[in-house]
Amino acid sequence: MSERPATLDPDVNEDHEALDEDYVLTAAFVEKVVDAADDGDGMRLRSLLEDLHPADVADLMGFLTAEHRGVVVLWLPPELLAETLPELDDGIREEVLERVAPGTLAEALQELDSDDAAAVVEDLEDDQREKVLAAMPATDRAAIENSLGYAEDTAGRLMQREVMAAPLFWSVGDTIDHVRAQGEDLPELFFDIYVVDPHNKPVGGIPISGLLRAARTVKLSDLMEPVNAIASDTDQEEVAYVFEKYHLISAPVVDAAGRLVGQITVDDIVNIIQEENREDILRLAGVQDEDRGSSVFEIVRSRVPWLTINLATAVLGASVISVFEATIQQIVALAVLMPIVSAIGGNAGTQALTVTVRALATRELNSSNAPRTFWREFVVGGANGMVLAPLIGVAAGLWSGDWRLGGVIASAMILNLIVAATVGVLTPLTLSRLKFDPAVSSAVFVTATTDFFGFLIFLGLATIVLL
């Protein structure tokens, strides 16, 4: 399949290509697909879709209604269907799978590597899963069942079982002849030959490029390089970190006894890194992963708990204001200036929080450099306050005609920015030490603290100085 189709078919004007210059499906193309689906024109649908890349077909499914998706999926060739399923958003994939006959799905899954096939089968209902697995050859069925036997989000679930290995005593010529003899049994994508000992434990690896450069008589033991073997129960986030740190293209996966059971390739890791980054970004905002197939009820259910927590913290901030109600009644200008202190503090706290969470996620921050990071952010908070305080102090003094009020808000600004920077660092560090995910829990604590202390410092200073 071509990654960038030319025109859709011979009688279509070149101005109506499927993708625009930014590799996004054009509205004109999506409309053609919708029209063909409305007309029940299956041959037209097949001609429109057969040259699309699977990722573009998955993108198309996100633009269609459930009714149109149900028609389109019936006309996808088995090979294209197979390659499209792993690319779909989870919600849409579950919906699509319900419309595919078990026999058709079993045929499609045989076109995939074991890791992608297992990811699809995992989304099936129990009864549908049994029917699909029963319709598959015993070898493919065993590979998928084995993958599903590993815990979710681990290297065992992520790996593909198809792997090229060679014994330690083989030569380059022996290995090349073996690879050529495999034919269609070769893994669809592999970068290294893993050298194993008599117990099937990986003792080294040889890049395909290195293998092809060497003479046929060279022994693998003289050519191999050390490998970073990954235990099958390793969390996928840890796997991504290893790949990123050591610049790996692929890595062998071993079981508890150290035996080679599969491999992980960089294309899987790219997906994991994107998934983990998306998760952290969403969690900082207090929402769960929502795709184009999510219903209104699912979205509301995921967001309401976070908003409820924020409501409780807002009440906490309001309680501080109520303590200084008499002060605000005497100096009405305080009510106008209060939101400025809390807003700037909240933004500064979010800046420190975001930087700290990212540093924790990328392993750039740990107990060895945490004190240095804390003091750096503390100084940054104070410096930001010294820059902003004169601006708001002069503005407040000119507006109110009371330079004491300008001094109060300038002082409150400095102190609250120091508090914000401190809390922005300490909160995720503390939660991480307590084994909680700092990306999930930090934001609400930082916001609540900056609001609470922002109001307390500003109104407290105003009460002391102005009354």
Image (cartoon, grey):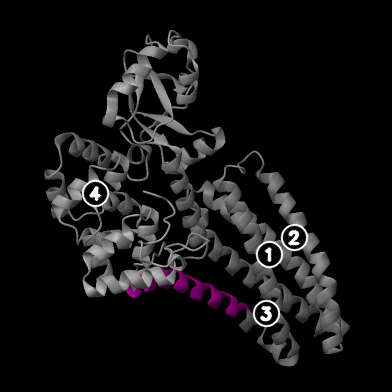
Residue 33, horizontal then vertical, whole percent: 32, 69
Marking on residue 381:
2
Marking on residue 348:
1
Give yes or no for residue 303 being in the magenta stretch.
yes
- Left or right of 59? Residue 144 is left
**Distance from Cα at disc 3 to Cα at disc 2:** 19 Å
**Distance from Cα at disc 2 to Cα at disc 4:** 51 Å
- The kind of residue on which mark 3 rests is Pro
- The kind of residue on which mark 4 rests is Val
- The kind of residue on which mark 1 rests is Ala
**Distance from Cα at disc 3 to Cα at disc 1:** 14 Å
**Distance from Cα at disc 2 to Cα at disc 1:** 8 Å
Q: Quadrant of residue 138 in the image?
A: top left
Q: Are marks 2 and 1 in contact (CB under 8 Å)?
A: yes
Give neighbour class at mark 2: few <14, some 14-19, many 20+ (Cα, 10 Å): many
**Residue beneath label 4, please?**
121
